[in-house]
Image: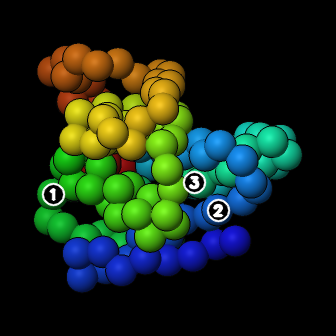
Amino acid sequence: MNGHLAFNRGKIHYSDTGTGPAIVLLHGFLESLEIWDDFTKELSKEFRIIAIDLPGFGKSSDVAEVHTMEMMAKAVYEVLSHLNTGQVVITGHSMGGYAALAFAASHPEKMKGLVIFHSHAAADSEEARINRDRAIRA
C-alpha cells in the first residue's frame, strides 16, 4: 500500500507492505523509496516493510528551506505513528543512515535495531560536503 501523510505544510510519501516485525527503509541522497523495491519484494514475505520518501525526495514534498536530519527523523516518526507501528528496525543508506541515527537519538523507545550502510555516525568531512553541494548544483 502506498500512502501520503500531511507533514509541515506538505506531504510525506511512504509504502507499507507485508506483515510481521517492522523494518523501515530510508533511502540515500538524491534517491527515493523505489531504490528499495527489490528488497521490499523479498523482505515483505516475512516482515512488514515501510519505505519512506524522505522530505524533498521522491514523491514527498519539499517541506522546509533546510531539511535537517532531525526534521527528517520527525517525518519518519510521524509516518510510524500514523501506521501504528511498535518498535522497528531502521535501515538507512547513506543520507538515510544519518536520518536513522537522528531518529534513534530522538526516539530510542521505538528502536528494535539499526542498520546503516554507506553511512557513518560522524559528520561529513569538508570534502564530502563540497562533493554533496556539487551534486546538488548538478
Name the residue at 61% across, 46% down: 22
For badge 1, the amino acid type reads Val
Counting from the top left corner in percent of width and height, residue 96 is at: 42, 39
1 and 2 marks in contact (CB < 8 Å):
no
Residue 125 visible, this angle: yes
Label 1 to label 2: alpha-carbon separation: 27 Å
| Residue 21's disc number | none
Name the residue at 57% across, 76% down: 3
Counting from the top left corner in percent of width and height, residue 80 is at: 45, 59
| Residue 51's disc number | 3
Q: Which residue is mark 2?
A: 16
Q: Which of the marked residues, 1 or 3, is nearer the chain's N terminus?
A: 3
Quadrant the N terminus occupies? bottom right
Q: Which of the marked residues, 1 or 2, is nearer the chain's N terminus?
A: 2
| Residue 66's disc number | 1
For badge 2, the amino acid type reads Asp
Label 3 to label 2: alpha-carbon separation: 7 Å
Counting from the top left corner in percent of width and height, residue 52 is at: 50, 57
Tell me the SS state at disc 1. loop
Residue 25 visible, this angle: no
Counting from the top left corner in percent of width and height, residue 50 is at: 59, 54
Label 1 to label 3: alpha-carbon separation: 22 Å
Along the line of sight, the residue nearer the viewer: 121 or 35: 121
Q: Which of the marked residues, 3 or 2, is nearer the chain's N terminus?
A: 2
3 and 2 marks in contact (CB < 8 Å):
no
For badge 3, the amino acid type reads Ala
Tell me the SS state at disc 3. strand
How many neighbours does mark 3 have within 10 angstroms: few (below 14), some (14-19), or many (20 or more)? many
